[in-house]
Image: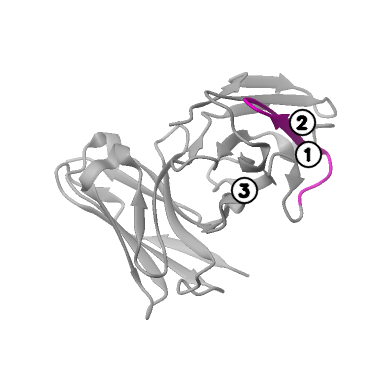
Amino acid sequence: EIVLTQSPGTLSLSPGERATLSCRASQSVSSTYVAWYQQKPGQAPRLLIYGSSSRATGIPDRFSGSGSGTDFTLTISRLEPEDFAVYYCQQYGSSLWTFGQGTKVEIK
Amino acid sequence: QVQLQESGPGLVKPSQTLSLTCSVSGDSISSADYYWNWIRQPPGKGLEWVGYIYFNGNTYYNPSLGSRLTISLDTAKNHFSLRLSSVTAADTAVYYCARRFVTPTKGWFDPWGQGTLVTVSS
């Protein structure tokens, strides 16, 4: 099983600031096989990024993804009020698909 | 527009069987392009992929759930179902259904249902 470890657990930032979220895999994952989701309270996760760096339909370009091997990053260039949420990474490079434990982006 | 909707009891007693259904609209679960999945999230915790079913009835389950899990489909009703036996409090979670491409390089989940909370308690 590939374990994904996200850091930090919580990120306290102000609107307009840049957010950098990390996802580290316990073994190498092709960048093709990493996705990121946003989840707001009481809602289902929403796909943001797939293939490490491709934005899903309708996702603003302030969201970007990058990474390779065991280290992947989600960046939000300028936080908007609606971006404060929990973010999860997911890998689909092995037969058992796994998620990270999440990073909460909260208003400072 | 594809939509998924979970339904089922919100409360299940310990040792009994949890049963949920995911109704799909805007797409056919008979499509060979997709896996139909269950994913769960214990309150305040992260996401765990539970298992999937394919249009031909093939299934693949998270080994952590062992033999307690059964996923089935009803093509006539365009829905698929989850049954989890011998439940304990650890099975308390919001259960989501979600679609995933079969193609390995397209393994993200999209869309998702809104989720349904199942509490295991006597």
Residue pictured at 81% horizontal, 29% vertical: A15
From this view, report whether residue A89 is shown above or below residue B102: above
Of residues A28 and B51, the one nearer the viewer is A28
- Which quadrant would residue A102 be assigned to in this image? top right
The Cα–Cα distance between marks 3 and 2, rounded to whole angstroms, is: 16 Å
The tag earlier along the polypeptide, 3 or 2, is 3
The Cα–Cα distance between marks 1 and 2, rounded to whole angstroms, is: 6 Å
Q: Residues within 10 Å of mark 3 (few under 14, many from 20)?
A: some
Q: Position of residue A75 (x, y in %)?
A: 76, 31
> Is A26 left or right of A87, judged from the image as shown?
left
* Residue receiving disc 1: A63
On what subunit does the disc labeled 3 rest? A
The tag earlier along the polypeptide, 1 or 2, is 1
Res A75 label? 2
Q: Secondary structure at mark 2?
A: strand
Q: Residues within 10 Å of mark 1 (few under 14, many from 20)?
A: some
Q: Are marks 1 and 2 in contact (CB under 8 Å)?
A: yes
* Residue receiving disc 3: A46
From this view, report whether residue B108 is shown above or below residue A72: below
Which part of the image, by quadrant, shows the C terminus of chain A? top right
